Amino acid sequence: MTPYEHCTTLATMSNTFGEYLRMTTWGESHGPGIGCVFDGVPAGIPLSEESLVEALARRRPGRELTSPRNEPDLPRILSGWFEGRTLGTPLAIWIESVDARSEDYDTIARLYRPGHADWTTEARYGHRDPRGGGRASARETAARVAGGVVAMAILRTIAPIEIVGWVDRVGEIASQVDPETVTRAEVDAFPVRCPDPAAQATMTERIVAARDAGDSLGGWVRVVARGVPAGWGDPLFGKLKALLAQGLLSLPAAVAFESGEGIASTFRTGLENNDAFIPGPAGPVPQTNRSGGQLGGISSGASIVSGVGFKPTSTVAARQTTVDLEGNAVEFEGTGRHDPCVLPRAVPVVEAMMALVLADRALARRAFPPAEGVELSGR
């Protein structure tokens, strides 16, 4: 039985993220372009195409340790913007694709590649674009990075928030990075985007060795948002960490999420794990930040710290076994242009998703402010 026989109803796809700041991304890996459309962007927000170009340059391929696909990723703002400010109408951003090589996928279009969404996409929709992964490709994340620029523009009108991500681990190689002091310049100083000089050198060696062997590596990206006021997010189903998990786990190749010290906290006692409060100028301040800047799903005023784990890139040059569309067992070798490790290019995408979640929660707070007479530090 083919996947098409399973598909008995017309299936649609979820392409929109956010509640008050709603971003819809569109486009496939080897289509003419990709982009995003925003609804809910307030009018009068300063925004420049130059800021979009700068952000997309950090994610684009064609650099050391990345896929050789050479996309310039030059964005155009098509609507919702005039004379450097948003209009409050739908904001549309277009990014043209100019270096697609669809012929690279001719030989594997009739295969279900291990680790990819080929089979599951057909099982769900009955039809798919096999060129480079289609909609499931990491090419889509360029639109998210553009969206992160819009989100940061909104956040800057509310609070002096700074978001910095970095490669924290590649395979078993861990780094030592202080979330309270790390800067984007320190992160971008190395191609692997790990600001720990000793760790980044070993990470780079391992990624190059994996690439040369026709293999790939996974690991962790961590991200911090400094300057987030207390009081953003809601308990239960609107927890800030739950929304961050949804956003970060929606990224291609993402397989795990941590809030604060996450897994490490499960090995401690309550006394060891609690963040003691000390007096602060605008209310209690956590003396430590094991909780990652959240309590009960609501921001505490400390830095928001999260981590997202990525699996090794699924396409590798080494020979593998799989099944073709007719159900026959076959062998194949991966083709196309792929990152030997997604982590360096994932950093700006992780930053963007954190910005999108925080901007959405900031707008939610403005939509439903505290009751009259209640003054809180996060207002």
Image (cartoon, helix red, strand yellow):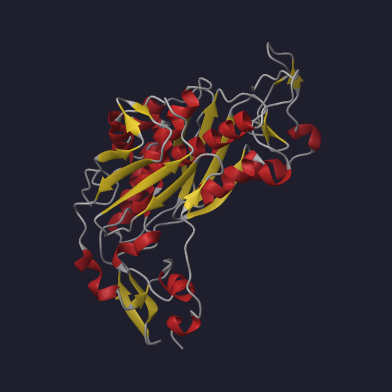
Residue located 39% across and 78% down the image: 322
Can you give x and y, in whole percent of width and height, for residue 173 in the image?
A: 47, 44
List the single residue furthest toward the top.
281
Residue located 60% across and 29% down the image: 366
Viewer-side residue, 197 vs 148: 148
**349 to 312, vertically: above or below:** above
Can you give x and y, in whole percent of width and height, for residue 123 in the image?
A: 47, 76
Q: Can residue 93 be seen here? A: yes
Q: Can residue 167 be seen here? A: no
Asked where in the image residue 262 lies, by quadrant, the reply is: top right
Can you give x and y, in whole percent of width and height, for residue 188 in the image?
A: 35, 31
**157 to 42, vertically: above or below:** above
Left-right relation of 106 to 274: left
Left-right relation of 337 to 40: left
Left-right relation of 278 to 84: right
Residue located 51% across and 39% down the image: 21
**316 to 181, vertically: above or below:** below
Q: How many marks?
A: 0
| Quarter of the figure with the C terminus | top right
Residue located 44% across and 54% down the image: 252
**336 to 109, vertically: above or below:** above
Can you give x and y, in whole percent of width and height, for residue 372 in the image?
A: 74, 21
Left-right relation of 104 to 250: left
